[in-house]
Image (cartoon, grey):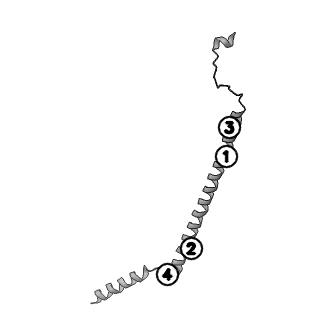
């Protein structure tokens, strides 16, 4: 009988020890809030970085288009090659 009573008492002790206290629950909730706030901040920074990249791409394309417009009308883009013998002359 003593063994049964001891085992029952031990089981109740373990079950009560595994329950979270309000303080522990509050700390876990605060930790979760900090993690979520960090994720939101990181997402906002990534969105801003994407906007900067897009803006730089547009500016680069606009400058390239402006340079292309400076080519004389009807000019073709041709590449010439010079051989080593031609350079020596």
Nearer the camera: disc 4 or disc 1: 1
Cα distance, mark 4 to mark 1?
A: 53 Å
Pointer 1: what residue?
56
Q: SS of the residue at dot 1?
A: helix
As measured in the structure, the alpha-carbon distance from the residue carrying label 3 to the one carrying label 2 is: 53 Å
Asked if residue 15 lies left or right of residue 4, the reply is right
Q: Secondary structure at mark 2?
A: helix
Q: Quadrant of residue 36?
A: bottom right
Badge 4 density bin: few <14, some 14–19, many ≥20, Cα 10 Å:
few
Separation of marks 4 and 3 at Cα, in angstroms: 66 Å
Give the mark nearest the N terminus, 1 or 2.
2
Closer to the eye: label 1 or 3: 3
Give the distance between the C-alpha atoms of the residues marked 1 and 3, in whole angstroms.
14 Å
Provide the secondary structure element on which disc 3 rests.
Answer: helix
Quadrant where the N terminus sits is bottom left
> Which residue is identified by label 2?
30
Task: Tell me where residue 75 appears, x and y as whole percent.
Answer: 68, 25
Q: Classify 10 Å Cα crowding around label 3: few (below 14), some (14-19), many (20 and above).
A: few
Query: Which labelled disc corresponds to residue 21?
Result: 4
Counting from the top left corner in percent of width and height, residue 53 is at 64, 48
**Left or right of residue 37, residue 70 in this image:** right
The furthest residue to the top: 89
Q: Residue at x 29, y 89 (%)?
A: 2
| Number of callouts | 4
| Residue wearing tag 3 | 65
């Amino acid at each position: 009988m003593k063994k049964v009573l001891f085992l029952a008492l031990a089981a109740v002790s373990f079950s009560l020890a595994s329950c979270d206290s309000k303080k522990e629950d509050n700390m876990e909730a605060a930790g979760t809030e900090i993690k979520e706030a960090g994720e939101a901040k990181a997402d906002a920074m990534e969105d801003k970085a994407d906007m900067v990249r897009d803006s730089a791409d547009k500016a680069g394309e606009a400058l390239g288009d402006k340079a292309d417009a400076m080519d004389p009308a009807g000019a073709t883009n041709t590449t010439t090659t010079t051989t080593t013998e031609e350079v020596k002359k």
